[in-house]
Amino acid sequence: MKLDTTGLEMAAPLWGSHSELVDGFSAAPSFELPITTDFDGFQKEAVQMVKPAKGTTTLAFIFKEGVMVAADSRASMGGYISSQSVKKIIEINPYMLGTMAGGAADCQFWHRNLGIKCRLHELANKRRISVTGASKLLANILYSYRGMGLSVGTMIAGWDETGPGLYYVDSEGGRLKGMRFSVGSGSPYAYGVLDNGYRYDMSVEEAAELARRAIYHATFRDGASGGVASVYYVGPNGWKKLSGDDVGELHYKYYPVMPSMVEQAMVEVAGA
Amino acid sequence: MTKQQANWSPYDNNGGSCVAIAGADYCVIAADTRMSTGYNILTREYSKICKLADKCVMASSGFQADVKALQKQLAARHLIYQHQHNKQMSCPAMAQLLSNTLYYKRFFPYYSFNVLGGLDNEGKGCVFTYDAVGSYEKVGYSSQGSGSTLITPFLDNQLKSPSPLLLSVQDAVTPLVEAEAIDLVKTVFASASERDIYTGDKIEIVVVNATGIRREYMELRKD
């Protein structure tokens, strides 16, 4: 099986001649594979040890003004919350964002790799890469590792010459173009709110509020989502972070506690 | 014919816990010194902490053979960096190197749960926390290892600061002074060794600040 390793540094430079020309991006594969009779079983066990954080809610949608991207920030390992401050919206370059769902290390590494590839494309072709092209690069890499246990469910959102672009890419090798996506264990809840409130001609503030609410509602009902709801906007001048709100505080903002009428107050009894 | 199962695993867990706390101008990294396998203690005096660069220290728990291999790999890459760039690697640079090194073994992982601590280029404390395959995050404090589920809630209670993802980005470093942070670390390990069988014997505490790196020890329960 030919793995696409064009983005990886060679392990070889450590012993061979370390010439500047060959530095980093050459043909020889460099992922070591364990020598075992049962590769799949071994991978299954290794995956158990790594326990990818699938619990998450991310969403993105295209509207009149551009693309809105939002995500929660909780990472869970089984029932344990390993972090409440994970950056699930990854800045690939100043005009493209990627979202993270599935294995945290897989998403971080391959998004960084995609950023490198996009930059190389810019240098080689003297123009920015399109969202279509970037998502295809990522999808092809993930397809070549299909079946090996990578867990990536990502959305690539950006603004290129053709306008706003949004693609869903996953580790099964799937790549879909669309206007609205939500990925993760909290996605059914987010879809409910998002689909209900979506209109193509919204203003940036309305779209941001819709995205924020959708994430909030997903974190409310899904135990594996929580932390901080981050909202980013991608426009013709690149992306901008619009807000990051703790979902606990959002709850009380949307549903403030009303002081209730007390019928009978307790009175201090003197002495006794 | 039934599938053949391996009756040997390349991995083992040697237990132990590590903690790191970042301050305004210092960083405290600590780990216990007990190395176990199953219910046996192999040694009471094993160091899980490794100095990777002038201002960068790593503590790792998990499978110590993989940890040793990882430390050697990082030291070698750091040496190459020094030859090529004529300077030491900064802590954030080492953090990304560690992440990539872990991910290159994505299909046969290092069973190593790491925390990296040190000073960044401006002299502020920074702590990076990792999972076994390289996903990492800059945080104000972190704990890994067998006692981490006991230690982390306590650190959250004492040190938790507003999330770095909130829009007005706030510093994750703790307002505690160095002596208070060291005291906190000692308290935390004392509690962890009460309830975690794999944590105990001694704590090795490494402090990185502007004057350099210093090491101190504290005795823990030996049972």
Image: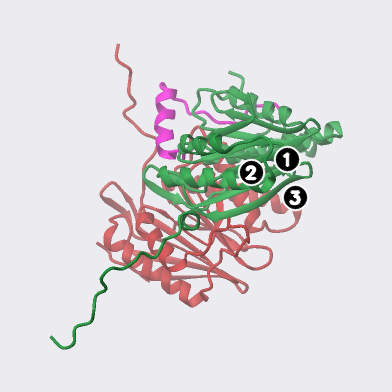
Chain colours: A green, B red
Q: Secondary structure at mark 2?
A: helix
**Amino acid type for the residue under numbered disc 1:** Glu
Q: Secondary structure at mark 1?
A: loop
Instruction: Name the residue at 72% across, 27% down.
Output: A132
Classify residue B71 as left or right of residue A27.
Answer: left
Indicate whether residue A222 is drawn in magenta.
no
Q: Secondary structure at mark 3?
A: helix
The residue tagged 1 is A65
The residue tagged 3 is B84
Classify residue A162 as left or right of residue A15.
Answer: right
Query: What subunit carries mark 3?
Result: B
Query: What subunit carries mark 2?
Result: A
Q: Tell me where the magenta segment starts and ends, as one range.
A: A26-54
Whether the residues at callouts 3 and 2 have beta carbons within 8 Å, the answer is no
Query: In terms of image quadrants, where is residue A98?
Result: top right
Circle 2: is it few (<14), some (14-19), or many (20+) Cα within 10 Å? many
Query: What subunit carries mark 1?
Result: A
Instruction: Name the residue at 68% across, 26% down.
Output: A136
Residue A110 seen in the figure = no
**Amino acid type for the residue under numbered disc 2:** Ala
